[in-house]
Image (cartoon, grey):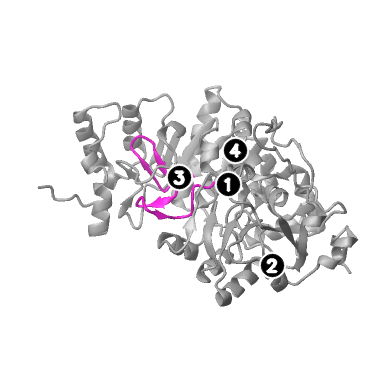
Amino acid sequence: MENLARIKNKTLTDKIILAEEAAGLIQNGMVIAASGFTKSGDSKAVLPAFGERAQIDQSQITLITGASLGQDTDAKLAAANAISLRLPFQADATMRRHINSAQLLYIDENLGETAMHLKTGVFPAIDIAIIEAVCIHEDGSIVPTTSVGNSAVFAALAKKVIIEINTAVPENIEGIHDIFLSGSYPEKAIIPITSVGQRIGTGSIPCDPEKIAGIVFTHKKDSPADIQPADNTTSKIAGYILDFLKNEVAAGRLTQSLLPIQAGIGKVANAVLQGFANSDFEHLTMYSEVLQDSAFDLFDAGKLDFASGSSITVSEACYQRVFDNLEKYKDKILLRPQDITNSAEVISRLGTIAINTALECDIYGNINSSHIAGTHIMNGIGGSADFAQNSYISIFVTESTCKGGTISRIVPMVSHVDHSEHDVDIVVTEQGLADLRGLAPRQKAEAIIKNCVHPDYREMLAGYYAEACERGGQTPHVLEKAFDWYHNLRTTGSMKRQPVLT
């Protein structure tokens, strides 16, 4: 009876079915859209049940989500060969192997664009949407759990909707969601957000009760985020960024409250955000995609006033702290659809300071954030370009080397471009920070080589740049040698060794 109380519209109680029955509604070749954004608020019963069935009947689907899923669902679906096409983001090693071996197709796109591509018919129509909820209102509207992602547009466009009511999430989470549907061209609405904490929508996702094909009850927490503690390298990077921001305050370009902060996922981003706790900055705000442990640490430190995102993705310990003290945080956070959190309009208006991670950077500031050696996808571009292209300050961070120093993350020319030099203001490694604003390409190269390159590679990179300059050009390169470092790595196991030229 306690579970049934979460369905406010009692005419819907006859829609309650088992996960296996709900999975049975998914037919071979269907387009399935599922809630979930960076392991939070994802399908914890129906998609896994479909994966088990697909091992037997070899069904395949197109799967669209907000971002990555938890519960190892992507891994299980990939191993069962249950996916023919996946978009717009994943972060699973098993699925990554299937993508890179061409066993399944993958569309890696800016997370802020998926909703519009669905609304305008660029992507095929959604057959079934699977959405995790804390409860269903009398009008059929859905109160999400720990993420919003693309769930609102999924519910609006899907032919049928399956709702997973997760009783592990307390009902008092209701109130932290801000659901706003911006429509489509040519009537696309202005998104009237002028401050981070401004609520512009409703607390639930509209859904026609007639579209609800099944309701499944679950009781399972989100998969915990793997939060790595700050180390010497990440602490140095954080220190450089904090010093840079202090100098911006001293120059009169920022105040002690800065501007809204966006930070990608990972130990570097967490280290940077944690660094704010012991800084002189105060009354900070966050306009981001994911609210991580560091956001709640800053709340507890009295440094962060408000945070807007699309999901809460935290470690197991932080998850317990947040939900044991939810009333403490409820008036300080909002979860929104990802086409709102990642909207160019809002990011630009608020003047966001974006901090994202690079896999590699070249001497002119072009960034590769998604592909290993230019060909093999790691995770994807995510929302980094949404913020990099539209923020007030776009910062990219990376360690200067990896794999025991055999790979330099600063290279002559990146093997894959996700963010061009025009969208990159600051590059930071543990070696130092290069401020690229107001610099011509040659000046950018000199700043990056001087400040960001590991000493083991600095002479090599300076030599490449000197030879390139002899050839001239606005953006000097030696094209026949631009990718020699990758050839060295493939043939010798290290970028350090120079090839023998004949």
Q: Pick whichever, 167 or 49, lies toward us.
A: 49
First along the sequence among labels 3 and 2: 2
* Residue kind at label 4, given as amino acid type: Ile
What residue sits right under mark 3 in the picture? 236
Tell me the element at label 1. helix
* Residue kind at label 2, given as amino acid type: Leu
| Alpha carbon distance from label 3 to label 1 | 12 Å
Query: What is the number of callouts on the image?
Result: 4
Front: mark 4 or 3: 4
Categorize mark 2 by other alpha carbons within 10 Å: few (<14), some (14-19), many (20+).
some
Where, by quadrant of the figure, is residue 468 drawn?
A: top left
* Residue kind at label 1, given as amino acid type: Gln
| Alpha carbon distance from label 4 to label 2 | 42 Å
| Alpha carbon distance from label 1 to label 4 | 13 Å
First along the sequence among labels 2 and 1: 2
For residue 289, which numbered disc appears in the image? none
Q: Residue 253: horizontal and vertical position, in percent?
A: 55, 24
What residue sits right under mark 4 in the picture? 261
First along the sequence among labels 4 and 2: 2
What residue sits right under mark 2 in the picture? 25
Front: mark 1 or 4: 4
Q: Pick whichever, 238 or 73, lies toward us.
A: 73
Q: Which residues are magenta?
A: 357-382
What residue sits right under mark 1 in the picture? 274
Q: Are marks 2 and 1 in contact (CB under 8 Å)?
A: no
* Residue kind at label 3, given as amino acid type: Lys
Tell me the element at label 2. loop
The structure residue drawn at horizontal position 39% and vertical position 36%, both measured from the top left corner, is 365
